[in-house]
Image: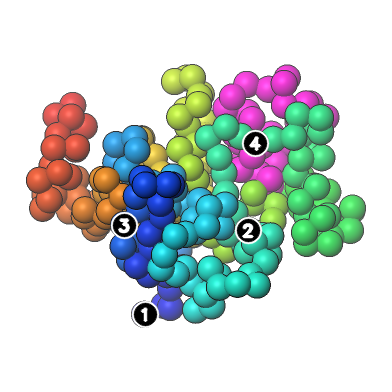
Amino acid sequence: MSEPIIEVRHLSKRFGRNEVLRDLDFSVLPGEVISIIGASGSGKSTLLRCINLLEEPTGGSILFHGQEVTAPGTDPCALRARVGMVFQGFNLFNNMTVLENCVAGQRKVLRRSREEARANAMAHLEKVGMASYINAKPRQLSGGQKQRVAIARALAMDPEVLLFDEPTSALDPQMVGEVLEVMRQLAAEGLTMLVVTHEMAFARDVSSRVVYMADGVICEQGAPAQLFGAPQNPRTREFLSRFNSR
């Protein structure tokens, strides 16, 4: 069996008196597509932000290839080059073109030459169907196009794992499909992915594992067929009842 890429051990996170994550244990194996589902406020996005060191855990530890990244002295930028993240708000640089957005991180963090970074960026923009927009600024793009550029930018860093924090929640309904199709393609190619999502059909059809969170804890996790077809936890059953009744 493969060794985990990421291990979360007894993770907790507080914001003041508000305990957002409570004693989480969680692991990610190479090639897994894990969808994290649950109501708003259940701690899903905070879990991703802790894994990527955008938030500092209050307790517990996070390991990447067996090395504790929550230990003092860890370089967050080095970790984020290997554990990429796609945000619901795109987080593109508005003063840069599409191509410049996809080149900047490679140049600064990976120290690639301009030619190498540009060629790599173009390959990933082609993959997500945005190669013809390389000279556009983000303000000239639709929400779906911005998110596809954000995915290309993350992929251009050649991450081992890609985290998606509700990547379709800021999109108009007609634009959701184009982003989900790119994500399905990445899953089919074997990219390791953690996806916080409200898109239940994606979680059911694309994931290798689904995790249901509520009130800062993992209530249940398992294969999509098990979780959607025969959830064991009453809270999971209640949450999924609206989707399963459609």
Q: Amino acid at mark 3?
A: Arg
Q: CA distance from mark 1 to mark 2?
A: 26 Å
Residue 158 pos. (x, y %): 66, 59
Residue 86 pos. (x, y %): 57, 44
* Marks 1 and 2 in Cβ contact (< 8 Å): no
Q: Amino acid at mark 2?
A: Arg
Examine the rendered structure and indicate whether residue 30 appears above or below residue 42.
below
Q: Measuring 69% from the left and 56% from the top, which residue is drawn there?
A: 157
Q: Measuring 39% from the left and 40% from the top, which residue is drawn there?
A: 197
Secondary structure under tag 4 reads loop
- The residue singled out by tag 2 in the image is 80
Q: Measuring 34% from the left and 38% from the top, which residue is drawn there?
A: 41
Looking at the image, residue 219 sits to the left or right of residue 115; the answer is left
Looking at the image, tell me whether mark 2 or mark 4 is earlier in sequence order: 2
Residue 183 pos. (x, y %): 49, 43
Q: CA distance from mark 3 to mark 2?
A: 24 Å
- The residue singled out by tag 1 in the image is 1
* Marks 3 and 1 in Cβ contact (< 8 Å): no
- The residue singled out by tag 3 in the image is 22
Secondary structure under tag 1 reads loop
Residue 181 pos. (x, y %): 48, 37
Secondary structure under tag 3 reads strand
Q: Amino acid at mark 1?
A: Met
Residue closest to the eye, 49 or 192: 49
